[in-house]
Image: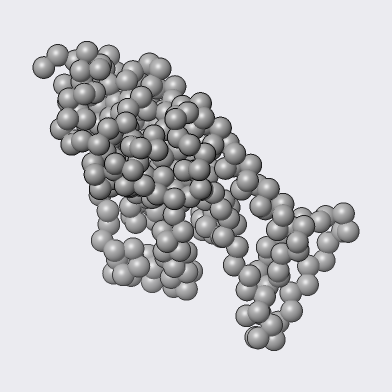
């Protein structure tokens, strides 16, 4: 069932991630599906597909500040396969946040961010959790590299988002990539026929070997449109200074990200930590 879950997420669910990264995820999934299970599970084959196992950093607490790693593709319910490839589980971040909020020795939270985004599933809930955490203890996002799509949604509720001149933020977008393989089926001599009741207009939509009807496509479009509207509404509440024209899928580097309200300061990580400590009233 785990493989079925992965396939459903990759091939038929909306994503909040940059297109190039999603394409690489599809290629990774394709390699896994083409390999016999015993071959894929062998360490040399796993390394061949995923690369060397990524050791994800753990939360650290230093002088009252909880530093929470927030790197990689965000995945709800990420298992060993995804984590081996460097994915970040929503559940792990949630655990870190709750532990930091419950720890009386923690006065502030700092998220160390470098993420291209991830799945829609779980991202809105994580964004709400971080917004609520900000009401309890000061939260800062330090953007080490990327903060795109689902990652920016999640971090937008932080009281402070800092980055450097080369930090890149944005990609406020939502899409569902559908691969129509009906031509390949036809070329191979197959014709897929879906038998269903007349009233079941959307049943088996996107089944391999079939093309979407215009009604099915419009329904899928309405789903990603609704999700993007949820994203924009959240930003209007927590970051009202971001102009609507900047919410079109573009990304922005340092100074430009600051101009459109995605960054609160363009500085160094050392200065970011100093500002957070000062705001939280942590004495040196």
Measuring from the top left, give residue 189's x and y in whole percent: 69, 86
Measuring from the top left, give residue 235's x and y in whole percent: 49, 32
Visible residue check, residue 29: no
Q: Is residue 233 left or right of residue 162?
A: right
Measuring from the top left, give residue 244's x and y in whole percent: 52, 39
Please name whichever residue, 50 or 172, is drawn nearer the observer in this view of the structure: 172
Visible residue check, residue 271: yes
Residue under the point 44% across and 54% down: 18
Marks counted in the figure total 0
Residue 26 versus residue 168 in the image, above or below: below
Picture quarter containing residue 85? bottom left
Residue 90 versus residue 50 in the image, above or below: above
Residue at the farthest right position: 198
Q: How is the image coloured?
A: one colour
Quarter holding the C terminus? top left
Residue under the point 36% across and 24% down: 159
Residue 17 versus residue 228 in the image, above or below: below
Please name whichever residue, 108 or 185, is drawn nearer the observer in this view of the structure: 108
Picture quarter containing residue 264? top left
Please name whichever residue, 250 or 181, is drawn nearer the observer in this view of the structure: 250
Measuring from the top left, give residue 234's x and y in whole percent: 52, 31
Residue at the farthest left position: 284
Quarter holding the N terminus? bottom right
Residue under the point 14% across and 14% down: 283
Residue under the point 62% across and 80% down: 184
């Amino acid at each position: 069932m785990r493989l079925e879950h992965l396939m459903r997420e990759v091939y038929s669910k909306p994503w909040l991630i940059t297109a190039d990264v999603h394409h690489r995820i599809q290629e990774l999934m394709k390699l896994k599906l083409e390999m016999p299970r015993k071959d894929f599970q062998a360490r040399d084959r796993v390394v061949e597909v995923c690369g060397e196992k990524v050791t994800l950093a753990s939360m650290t607490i230093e002088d009252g500040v909880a530093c929470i790693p927030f790197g990689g593709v965000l995945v709800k319910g990420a298992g060993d396969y995804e984590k081996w490839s460097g994915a970040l589980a929503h559940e792990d971040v949630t655990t870190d946040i709750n532990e930091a909020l419950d720890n009386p020795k923690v006065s502030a939270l700092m998220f160390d961010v470098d993420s291209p985004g991830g799945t829609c599933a779980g991202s809105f809930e994580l964004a709400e959790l971080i917004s609520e955490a900000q009401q309890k203890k000061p939260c800062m996002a330090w953007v080490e590299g990327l903060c795109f799509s689902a990652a920016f949604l999640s971090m937008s509720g932080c009281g402070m988002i800092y980055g450097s001149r080369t930090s890149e933020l944005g990609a406020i977008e939502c899409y569902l990539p559908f691969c129509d393989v009906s031509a390949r089926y036809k070329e191979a001599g197959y014709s897929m026929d879906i038998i269903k009741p007349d009233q079941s207009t959307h049943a088996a939509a996107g089944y391999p070997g079939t093309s979407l009807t215009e009604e099915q496509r419009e329904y899928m479009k309405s789903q990603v449109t609704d999700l993007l509207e949820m994203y924009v509404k959240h930003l209007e509440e927590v970051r009202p200074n971001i102009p609507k024209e900047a919410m079109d899928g573009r990304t922005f580097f340092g100074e430009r990200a600051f101009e459109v309200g995605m960054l609160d300061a363009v500085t160094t990580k050392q200065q970011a930590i100093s500002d957070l400590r000062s705001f939280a009233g942590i004495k040196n």
